[in-house]
Amino acid sequence: MTEQTTIKVLYTSDIHGNILPINYGTNEKAELGLATYATLARKKRQENEHLIVLDNGDLIQGTPLMSHYVKNHAAKPNPMIAIMNRIGLDAGVPGNHEFNFGKTILQDAVNQSNYPWLSANILDKKTGEPYFGPSYIIKTLSNGIKVAITGVTTHYIPNWEAPEHNALWR
């Protein structure tokens, strides 16, 4: 008889700079934000030792907090990355909005992360290699099972972003 393992994946997507469970457009309580997600991630880790925690992109842009951060405090740690580091992601994938503020803000976010950013299809224009490093990781679970994790980012970014935001990758 073969041993069975339940692997659960908990992921975020399109967080858009939301930390608190508030809709910034209406100022009403909403079921969103990293504060709520952090609590959920902690609970799910207690329930399942084989949990994979991911972010699918569009993390660092979208709220007044992130606009203020970029304009006034970009030399300091990125608040969204600091929270994701605390949550303990296994990996993140850059979404199209990660490119909105240009290379420096994105590269700083990647450098500040305690987790890899995976994108098999964003390539360094000079080398042709994945821009963010290896395009996949292998996570070994506590029982020895290995799980491959990869990321793919929308190919439409050059159509949406300013050309200077795409100067180093294709």
Image: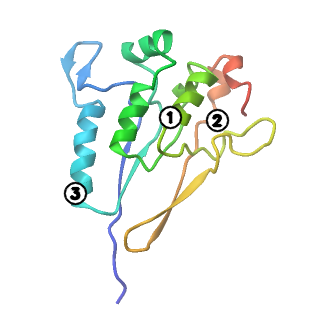
Q: Foreground mark, 3 or 1?
A: 1
Q: Nearer the viewer, mark 3 or mark 2?
A: 3
Q: Label 3 to label 1, Cα distance in Å?
A: 27 Å
Label 2 neighbour load within 10 Å: few <14, some 14-19, many 20+: few
Which residue corresponds to mark 1?
112
Q: Is residue 14 at least partly visible in the picture?
A: no
Q: CA gap, disc 2 to disc 1?
A: 25 Å
Q: Earlier in the sequence, mark 3 or mark 1?
A: 3
The amino acid type of the residue labelled 2 equals: His
The C terminus - image quarter: top right
- The kind of residue tagged 3 is Gln
Q: Is disc 1 placed on a helix, strand or loop?
A: helix
Q: Residue at x 57, y 45 (%)?
A: 118
Amino acid at dot 1: Gln
- Residue 155 image point, x, y percent: 64, 35
For the point 25% across and 25% down, which residue is it? 20
Residue sitting at the far front: 76
Compared with 97, 54 (above or below) is: below
Q: Residue 46: which numbered mark, if any? A: 3
